[in-house]
Image (cartoon, rainbow, N blue to C red):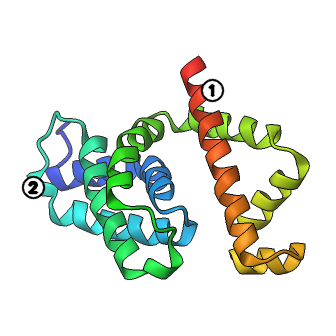
């Protein structure tokens, strides 16, 4: 039986890390739609640069480098729709997100636990914000608060969730 052709191997490598790449991009972009778009662009770039990948090295780490630059491009294109984290901040959290994406099952379990630990009001706000098609503005209208107040609350809740998830992952 012969080994798969190089292009087949690349398809297998790209396919095997889609979920983890998506989680990594979601962490960088804080938007499901932007993360999905950036994932598609990342896949295209990975395919175009497939001959630059050195077999035997960490494919996922290489793919995350490509994804990081695609996330930066997505932020540039849609600056008004994406939280304005600086590129310095993104470079700082990217290694944490990479490590988290590599252990995505543990990350997802920790996130679910942390969301359950939120008080009812905060959990409801997060759940409303991540409903399909929801925006900060639409959530603000539905809860009778200003968009600015909801944005600040979501920022606080995201920070709490981030700290909680890190704490739970360190416990493991």
Which mark identifies residue 168? 1
Label 2 or label 1, whichever comes before in sequence order: 2
Which mark identifies residue 62? none
Which mark identifies residue 51? 2
Q: Is residue 158 visible to us here?
A: yes
Q: Residue at x 23, y 66 (%)?
A: 45
Q: Position of residue 111 (x, y in %)?
A: 66, 40
Q: Look at the numbered disc 2 and give the secondary structure of its residue.
A: helix
Q: Is residue 21 left or right of residue 136?
A: left
Q: Position of residue 33 (x, y in %)?
A: 54, 72
Q: Residue at x 35, y 40 (%)?
A: 95
Furthest residue to the top?
171
Q: Are marks 2 and 1 in contact (CB under 8 Å)?
A: no
Q: Is residue 13 left or right of residue 113?
A: left
Foreground: disc 2 or disc 1: 1
Res 32 → quadrant: bottom right
Residue nearer the viewer, 127 or 103: 127
Q: Residue at x 37, y 54 (%)?
A: 90
Q: Residue at x 54, y 61 (%)?
A: 30
């Amino acid at each position: 039986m012969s080994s798969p052709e190089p292009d087949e191997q690349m398809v297998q490598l790209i396919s095997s890390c889609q979920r983890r790449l998506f989680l990594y991009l979601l962490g960088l972009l804080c938007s499901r739609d932007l993360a999905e778009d950036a994932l598609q662009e990342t896949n295209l770039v990975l395919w175009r640069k497939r001959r630059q990948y050195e077999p035997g090295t960490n494919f996922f780490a290489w793919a995350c480098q490509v994804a990081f630059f695609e996330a930066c491009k997505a932020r540039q294109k849609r600056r008004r729709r994406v939280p304005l984290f600086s590129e310095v901040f993104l470079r700082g959290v990217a290694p944490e997100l990479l490590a988290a994406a590599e252990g995505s099952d543990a990350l997802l379990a920790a996130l679910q636990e942390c969301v359950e630990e939120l008080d009812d009001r905060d959990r409801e706000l997060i759940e409303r914000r991540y409903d399909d098609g929801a925006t900060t503005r639409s959530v603000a209208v539905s809860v009778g608060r200003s968009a600015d107040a909801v944005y600040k609350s979501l920022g606080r809740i995201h920070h709490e969730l981030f700290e909680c998830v890190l704490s739970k992952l360190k416990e493991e």
